[in-house]
Amino acid sequence: MICVSLAGITFQECVKLISKTEFAEIRIDQLDLSDDQFGSLFAMKKKTIATCRPGKDDDQRLALLKLAIESGAGYVDIEYESDVTFRTELVNYAHSHNVLVIISYHNFKNTPSIEELNDIIDRSFIWGADRAKITTTATIRADCARVMSLYEKHENLIAFCMGEIGTITRVAAPLLGAEFTYAAISKALATAPGQLTIEGFMDVYGIIK
């Protein structure tokens, strides 16, 4: 399944894209919308992920993510590095509303050892994750193989590599067990290095089929 990351567009464009897609990540931190508009997007009865990366203060982020949960988000994404109080409150709030929790680890410099990655995944589930997300930066091809090998041991995992070298892992992830992979609306609006567009994914999967 392909999850389209919505960032840098208007409210009307968000509504149009959510209506046309099966699954969307609403990047609250990269959309200039009012609280009512955010609530409307999550209330569209579509499969959505609520994501709000650091930048705003934690109280503001917590309020926005709780609004998304209350409005109908299917998943809430919480950073692995989050403050324990912030994380615990949001995990409990999400579960009390039957919303699935993604605890996501991002490394924009390199790919840690397999031991460290396994530890991050195990700890994420201990903390209350329903899905663990591992996103590292591939500097050599062996990094891609290391991250893809995580699927041998773990379930409910979304793991892939960022960067040009890691692009292939974004394609492979759903084939190895990930529930979904992330796509950009366009190259200019990619939310992470190496992210393919929706059309790019469809072309690749069409060739594979």
Image: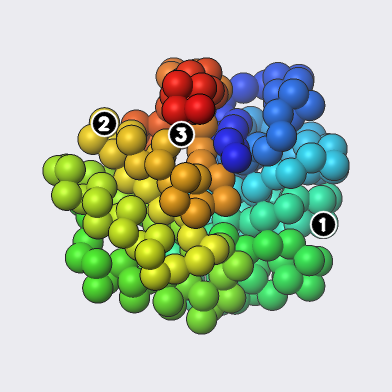
Task: Describe residue 18's horizontal placement relative to residue 89 as left or right.
Answer: right
- The disc label shown at residue 191, or none: 3
Label 1: state its secondary structure. helix
Quadrant into which the N terminus falls: top right
Residue 101 seen in render: yes
The residue where tag 1 is placed is 70
Q: Are marks 2 and 1 in contact (CB under 8 Å)?
A: no
Residue placed at 51% from the left, 31% from the top? 183
In the foreground, 63 or 95: 95
In the foreground, 161 or 68: 161
Mark 2, Cα crowd under 10 Å, few <14 / some 14-19 / many 20+, is few
Q: Give the distance between the C-alpha atoms of the residues marked 2 and 1, in whole angstroms.
A: 37 Å
The residue where tag 2 is placed is 164
Q: Hey, what amino acid is under mark 3?
A: Thr
Residue 146: x, y in percent?
25, 57
119 versus 136 height, above or below: below
Q: Hey, what amino acid is under mark 1?
A: Glu
Task: Describe residue 136's horizontal placement relative to residue 151 as left or right.
Answer: left
117 versus 19 height, above or below: below
Residue placed at 57% from the left, 51% from the top? 179
